[in-house]
Image (cartoon, rainbow, N blue to C red):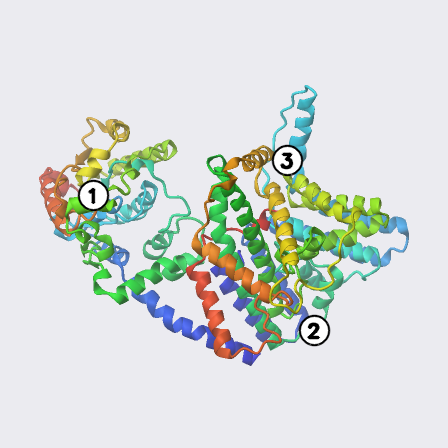
Amino acid sequence: MLTTSLEFAIFLPIVFLLYWFVLKNKLRLQNALILVASYVFYGWWDWRFLILIAISSLVDFLVGIGLNHAAEKSKRNILLGISLTVNLGMLGFFKYYNFFLESFVDAFTLFGYQMAPGRLDIILPVGISFYTLQTLSYTIDVYDRKLTGTKDFFAFFAYVSFFPQLVAGPIERATHLLPQFQQKRHFDVDSASDGMRQILWGLFKKIVVADNLAVYTYTISMNYQDHSASTLLMCLIMFSFQFYGDFSGYSDIAIGTGRLFGFRLMKNFDYPIFARSIPELWQKWHISLFSWFRDYIIKRLKGFRKWQVARNILIIFLVTGFWHGAAWTYILWGLLHALLFMQFIFWGRKKFKTPVAAGKVLPSWVELGQMVKTFMSFTLLALFFFIQPLSRCLGYLVALVDTSIVKVPLLPENRALAGIVLLLVVEWMQREKEHGLDLSGRSLPKAVRWSVYYGLLFAVFYYGGQPQDFLYFQF
Amino acid sequence: MKKFILHITCFILPLAVVFIPMELYLRDNSYQAKSDYLTAHKEEIETLVLGPSYAWRAINPLAMDMPTASLAHEASAINTNMMLFRKFSSQLPRLKYVLFDLSLGYMENDNDQRWESNHLFNIYYDIQNYRADVKNSFLLTANFKFYFKLFCGTMKDDKNVALFNESGFVYDVADYNNLFGTYEYDTARLRASGELFKRLTYQNSIHDESYVKNEKLLKEMVNECKRRDIKVIFIAPPKFCLNNKAATAEIIERRDRFLRNFEGDEEVEFWNYEHLLEDNAQFFLDNTHLNPKGAEIFTEVLNKRLSGLPLERRQAQIP
């Protein structure tokens, strides 16, 4: 079930009313409802996916309890090993089996051996990359004794499968989200209202900006040979906006939905389009993933010397790239980002402690230059994310280096461009707030606020593009 | 909590007050008429018309001597017509003729799941084309922009409202559909506007995959009709001369190739009226669609020819 679909618009109020009215003050039943709702939500795609998430949850639930009772290091290692093997094994099989198989065959072919093993026709279960990291965070935290293994079946299963963020994050830490399932939740009208606003803003970003741009970027990229270099560059720029609108839109809907049920999910995007450097961008883009790798991989590697930090950065980006997809383009994308990042390690970087143009209406010329440079770096590297396979990607890159770069580019539809302008203006004005429609600290008359809501809702319906799956569902 | 629910209700209520009546108003359309007419005359219908909007706008079922229903529709393709055939033909006990529009280029089309009229099949014929989708249960949620504009257009001016009879045939076209009428049937003005040349290439597009798929579907339909002693008549309604002249030899040959499958087969015929009225702009809405005046003539021609078929066939299935 897409969170932008009418099905979800019917599903959400039903769950909401049951949750707050029928099961009010009954924590276990509320958790059970969330679990059932999450499984309905997830099974809407394909009920067979439920088997995997149930196995993953059950294994980690039992491992968590086992870790409570295991004092010896060796026993704890075995239990952690079971969790890692099952979770990463399922992820590896469903997501990476064919990739490894093909890479293996290619390597043998290079040395003159011909192999023809059969590819498996595997469907990648939606969201497996996300919930695998979420459930692993629990086992690792219990292993590290940051958490006690829970015996509350419903709380744990609901934590792993919590429907607002199940299929595309934010990837929650057990230390942050699981306790919220274990304590009584109170309805907060201000928080819920703000959640609704965040959902609306997320819908706008996804449906008006990303979905409208999707047609343009898809059409151009599929026939890139027929277009000028300037159009190809424009297509990449538009893809960056599509990418941002799609993914941050999903996160806004997820966080807003969570707030309706009394949960606080972590922030996943902090206005990365206004980042002034690549390191700052990565503190603002897909925060939950990057911080997951930082907390669970990098902190174990340790090391503060420049070369050690550079090594860690290289590892984190390669893993990030590979996590995104079983293709060499993603790995290359991660590698190139790592290289961009490293220049700031070796040649020093300015740490930005305040938001861009803090307290001012407009940025300085220097800040503007920094933002454009960062955005364009991100955009050019997005090519490796956007175009598959590697051969087409390189073809696109070659086509970009052409004298036709000076030609007038083909632009997307006006409504898509208008959507981008509105997104930039609103998010710039709101860059120190939680989300684009966060009205805390602003006293706008009700008539104005409601006009904005109706206007955005109308834009979503009237100017919305052809509905598209969220980009991150494929990961 | 109460405050929150109250706010949400207050926010949604005006939307409901505006959009529910709008949805109800828009639902009264030619699809509804076609569906109602078919349901009301199930026991009598002897002729079923299928195909694209060319046939829908060209044949007035009420003007036919034989009880006739038309399910021909806009933006259609053979696969969507086959869905209608499968669903409804078995519900028509007296069905003797299927008139299937096989205009040039129609075999080269296919409607995939992005087909813009999925929702109409869902709402009016209870045919869930592709994956079930709640938004396809309502006109406004299925295509808000289109229906909102349509509604505003009809509210603005009566001339934007198409009038149809109980069988769903449009006898008074909306202004925005009447291209030739807008230019007062003056071909010189139409030529100068460039409008005449739009969509000319449409009928000449070749799609092998769709052709093969459609050929199979049509053969299935013919076989099913033969099994039930129903005659299949492929028809090609009149088109404006410019359209006929633009037809390529290849596209004509591809249709002929399919029709050669039925040479000597008495149960299958092809009635080609593409050139009928072709030089008379006053009978057309645009290059490919007859207007109600043209439809009146064509329906009469078709009616006479159909009535002239052996009487035994017409009475064969009457209990």
Judging by the rendered image, the residue that carries numbered circle 2 is: A184
What's the CA distance linking mark 1 and mark 2? 74 Å
Above or below for B13 versus A250: below
Count the marks: how many? Answer: 3
Toward which corner of the image does residue B257 lie, by quadrant? top left
Q: Secondary structure at mark 1?
A: helix
- Same chain for labels 3 and 1? Say yes or no: no
> Disc 2 marks which amino acid?
Lys
- Same chain for labels 1 and 2? Say yes or no: no
The x, y position of residue B173, in whole percent, is: 20, 56
Q: Which mark is residue B191?
A: 1
* Front residue of this view, candidates A178 and B176: B176
2 or 3: mark nearer the eye: 3
Judging by the rendered image, the residue that carries numbered circle 3 is: A98
Sequence-first disc among 2 and 3: 3
Which residue is depicted at the point 51% across and 74% down? A449
The x, y position of residue B156, in whole percent, is: 26, 66
Residue B53 visible in this rendered orientation of the protein: yes
> Disc 3 marks which amino acid?
Asn
